[in-house]
Image (tube, rainbow, N blue to C red):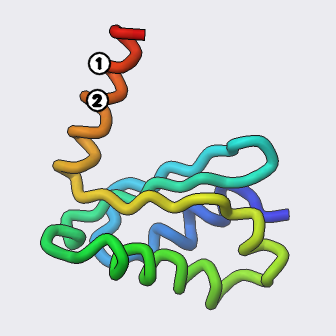
């Protein structure tokens, strides 16, 4: 079974990654990769890079443990945090 630490280390290889957060949603892993190098890079290209690391370096069984990978610039991540805080306050 894939561990949070192993996925965090692997996604830390994304060029320019300044933050990698990994957690569980049920039995699956969800990751957030923040990189300033994502500025002006289409989301599809960001995801292709992150998922390429997963698929190229993990067994099929381990890769199947990954549910989602979010890829944000620092600005997108800050906005997502503000949005989540506002949603909690409204909730």
Q: Residue at x 22, y 52 (%)?
A: 74
Residue 83 position (above or below residue 69): above
Q: Quadrant of the image for the C terminus?
A: top left
Please state if 71 lies on the left or on the right of 10 as rendered: left
Pick out the residue farthest to the bottom: 56
Task: Answer few, some or many: residues within 10 Å of disc 2's Cα (few below 14, many 20 plus, some between 14 and 19).
Answer: few
Is 89 located above or below residue 74 in the figure?
Answer: above
Residue at figure coordinates x 37%, y 54% from the top left: 19
Left or right? Give the position of 89 relative to 30.
Answer: left
Quadrant of the image for the N terminus?
bottom right
Helix, strand or loop at mark 2:
helix
The picture places residue 32, in percent across and down from the top left corner, at 45, 54
Left or right, 27 with reference to 32: right
Q: Is residue 89 left or right of residue 91?
A: left
Residue 35: percent from left, percent from top: 28, 64
View extreme (front): residue: 91
Find residue 23 and report its image quarter.
top right
Label 1, residues with CA under 10 Å away: few <14, some 14-19, many ≥20:
few
Callout 2 touching callout 1 (CB < 8 Å): yes
Q: Which mark is residue 42?
A: none
Question: Please, is residue 24 above or below residue 66 in the view?
Answer: above
| The quadrant where residue 70 appears | bottom left
Q: Which mark is residue 83?
A: 2
Residue that carries the numbered disc 1 in the rendered image: 86
Q: Quadrant of residue 78?
A: top left
| Residue 6 vs residue 41, the one in the foreground | 41
- Where in the figure is residue 42, as x and y percent of width and height? 25, 75
Disc 1 secondary structure class = helix
User: Marks 2 and 1, Cα distance to the nearest angstrom?
Assistant: 5 Å
- The residue lying at 81 percent from left, 48 percent from top is 27
Which residue occupies 23% across, 49% down?
A: 76
């Amino acid at each position: 079974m894939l561990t949070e630490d192993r996925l965090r280390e692997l996604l830390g290889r994304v060029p320019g990654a300044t933050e990698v957060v990994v957690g569980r949603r049920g039995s699956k892993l969800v990751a957030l990769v923040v990189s300033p190098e994502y500025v002006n890079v289409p989301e599809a290209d960001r995801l292709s890079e992150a998922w390429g690391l997963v698929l190229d370096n993990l067994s099929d069984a381990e890769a199947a443990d990954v549910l989602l990978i979010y890829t944000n610039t620092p600005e997108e991540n800050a906005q997502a945090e503000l949005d989540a805080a506002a949603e909690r306050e409204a909730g």
